[in-house]
Amino acid sequence: MANSAPSADRSTSLTLRRTSADRVPASWTDWRCSRRQSQRRHSPPPDLAAAFLRRRFFSPPYISCVTLVSTPAIVLRTYRYSETSKVVRLATRDYGVQSAIAKGVLRPRSPFGAALETLSEGVAQLYHKETRELQTLAAFDVIQLRRGLADDLGRFAGAAALSEVMLKMAPPAPLPAAYEAFIRGLDALVRAAAGQTDAAAVRWLWLLVGVLGFAPQLDACVRDGNAVSGTVAFSVGEGGVLCAKCAGPQPPTKLPPQAYRDLVALNDEQAPLPALDAPHAAAHRRLIARFVRHHLDETRRNGSEPKSSAIDIWERRAWVPPPSLAL
């Protein structure tokens, strides 16, 4: 009798469960089934949105187009982006001129520290994607600061003019020759003697614009190829010298024989650096500044000569007071 009691209770509970299930109204069961079928018919699968996000943002093609690259670079300019970040313009050897955001660089304990100063040379690590204009700067390891440029305003102004040419004329594409010319120009300004700073800056501005595809033609007339001699006309718009026949009665710029020889020497890296006195140095600064402005199209675009660029400050030596104001 004791062994039969549990089986009786179990059968009773099963009977009660079946009885309670049988007591559910048929209309209620049918309504729940029809509601489920309607949800399946009119609603997307629960994982459809997640599947779309996975394909859109986490699929292998998306991940492969953003790569961490390392390249030698020089800081050309920085802009404040937010309270903690900066946008950095970099001249890179392998990717041309690139813009990158340095996140958290303005925080007190930023890993960048003071590395992103103007004209700092180092190795930049970028999260690079070819289809976007603003990259992400992951790290910048400083190699050289060139503190000698900060010792003299003339040297720093010449370096700033070089960096502006690189910033505005170099493409966002690999151009190692321009990067190497830029570095050699900065080194030449550091090594230049006190009286040769202007000549060194003029030379490397001409050499840099030449590497970038704007080299002036100096050995023959730019129009008909005839030889030039004596006082030579130089046309900024046509990009070279003009013979007496093509120059006309009022040439754009007249170069005396010595000034022409100096210009040829300044465009030749292997030639000795010419010794320029103050008036001749000022004339050569004006010539290269006009040449750069013309090819940047700044004069025609703005309607007047720009007066706030690094090229203009270097050309006018704006840090030197006029003789009337000198003590």
Image (cartoon, helix red, strand yellow):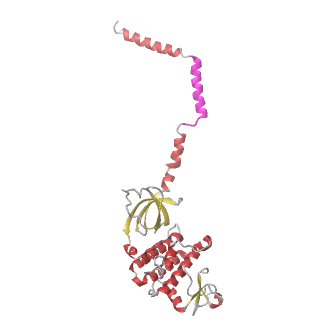
Q: Position of residue 140 (x, y in %)?
A: 40, 63
Asked whether the viewer can see residue 152, the reply is yes
Identify whether 6 is placed above or below 184.
above
Residue 93 percent across, percent down from the top left: 46, 69
Q: Is residue 31 magenta?
A: yes
Residue in the image at 54% along x and 16% along y? 24
> Toward the viewer: 51 or 140?
140
Query: What are the residue bounds of the magenta stretch?
Result: 25-45
Overall secondary structure of the magenta section: helix
The answer to which image quadrant residue 223 occupies is bottom right
Quadrant the C terminus occupies: bottom left
Residue most toward the bottom?
Answer: 230
**In which quadrant is the N terminus drawn?**
top left
Q: Up-down: is 20 above or below 197?
A: above
Residue 313's spot in the image, x, y percent?
A: 50, 75
Seen in the picture, residue 250 relative to 299 is either above or below; the reply is below
Q: Quadrant of residue 247?
A: bottom right
Q: Residue at x 57, y 24 (%)?
A: 32
Q: Nearer the viewer, residue 21 or 116?
A: 116
Count of marks placed on residues: 0
Residue 302 picture quarter: bottom right
Q: Is residue 183 above or below residue 249?
A: above
The residue furthest top is 1
Q: Let me know if residue 184 appears in the view.
A: no
Magenta stretch contains residue 286: no
Question: Residue 144 appears at what percent x and percent y?
Answer: 37, 70
